[in-house]
Image (tube, rainbow, N blue to C red):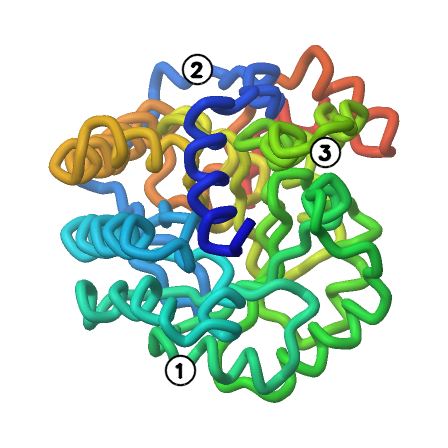
Amino acid sequence: MSRAERKMDHIQYALSTGQSSKNMFDDIRFVHQALPDVAVSDNCIKPETGDLKMKSPVFINAMTGGGGHDTQQLNGLLARVARETGIAMAVGSQMAALKDASERRTYSVVRKENPNGILFGNLGSEATVQQAHDAIEMIEADALQIHLNVIQELTMPEGDRDFRGALERIQAIAEQVKVPVIVKETGFGMSRETAGKLKQSAIAAIDVSGFGGTNFAQIENERRRKKLAYFEDWGIPTAASIVEVKSAFDKIVLASGGIQDAQDIIKAFLLGADAVGLAGSFLKTAMQQGEKQLIADIESLHEDLSMMMTALGAKKLIDLPKCPAIITGELAQYLSMRGFDPASYAIMKNN
């Protein structure tokens, strides 16, 4: 099977397998504030993301490219949506275009459709510094995602089996490219230990990409004769992974992994995220309902965020971690076992 065919397989399987919604956000409940002393007009939903310069708290996370005409069309659609809504967008892994120049157009289309937008390039941790430079140049990227996908590769029939030296390669890229580098998982989350290792590097941000969204182990198992079923429930749920990474990494923390709506987004910010990426739910809308509906959905997300911030008495996104919430169930148990105090989130913070 060619790389292009595999890319289209991933899209079709992502739509058919869906998202597990096991990201633990359901274990968080806000403490209602009957006297919020805030007006909707007071709210500012622009995030504080440093050199990433994002204007919206929401971005289109890495999905596709490298699969011929169909992925070119999809990336073009997503780029237009990003342009119309003012949100950032990441492309899927660009390694396909670095190995086959005919696939460049499936990625470069995003800059053509969104000439002034914030765009993130994307490569795996096997990439060299030169490949990173080439990927950035290909779409005139404002930042570069480097994805970690050990579980996907192990489940993929033709995937990698050697992951030595990844941290050193990431460090070399972060030191030598001229744009911020984001290290992201691909749906299995990041631990405090991983975040601690990455903190020592020159990267600008971590995207936790937790368990609970598109499950690439399940997708790759659809392509295997002997299924590795034990990887399908493997990973750190998104809500828990935000807490893990935030405890060890003092730069920008991005959250993704099964995030469906504004309530999930607000909860991610409450736990400490600085911006939130959506992929699977955006892909489903784009493929099944089209460009106009996706634009409308994103505009609705922005409106819903402002409404919920008002109800919580938060004028800015950075005020959300100060708001009290009750954490119960599996998330409370997970955090307690990992040495975090779920009760600390139930107390209003004054500073």
Res. 105 image quadrant: bottom left
Left or right position of 282 against 212: left
- Give the vertical position of 230 relative to 168 (above or below): above
The answer to whether any part of residue 87 appears in the image is no
Marker disc for residue 236? 3
The percent coordinates of residue 12 (x first, y second) are 42, 33
Three-letter code for the amino acid on which mark 1 is drawn: Glu
Element under label 1?
A: helix
Marker disc for residue 32? 2
Q: Assess disc 2: are there few (<14), some (14-19) or many (≥20) residues with their C-alpha within 10 Å of its C-alpha.
A: few
- Give the label, 3 or 1, closer to the camera: 1
Three-letter code for the amino acid on which mark 2 is drawn: His
Single out the residue that lies furthest toward the top.
329
Three-letter code for the amino acid on which mark 3 is drawn: Ile
- Give the vertical position of 244 relative to 62 (above or below): above
- Which residue appears at 56% of the width and 22% of the height? 25
Element under label 3?
A: loop
- Which residue appears at 18% of the width and 57% of the height? 83
Pick whichever, 11 or 101, lies toward us: 101
Mark sitting earlier along the chain (3/1): 1
Q: Name the residue under label 1.
A: 137
- Which residue appears at 54% of the width and 36% of the height? 257
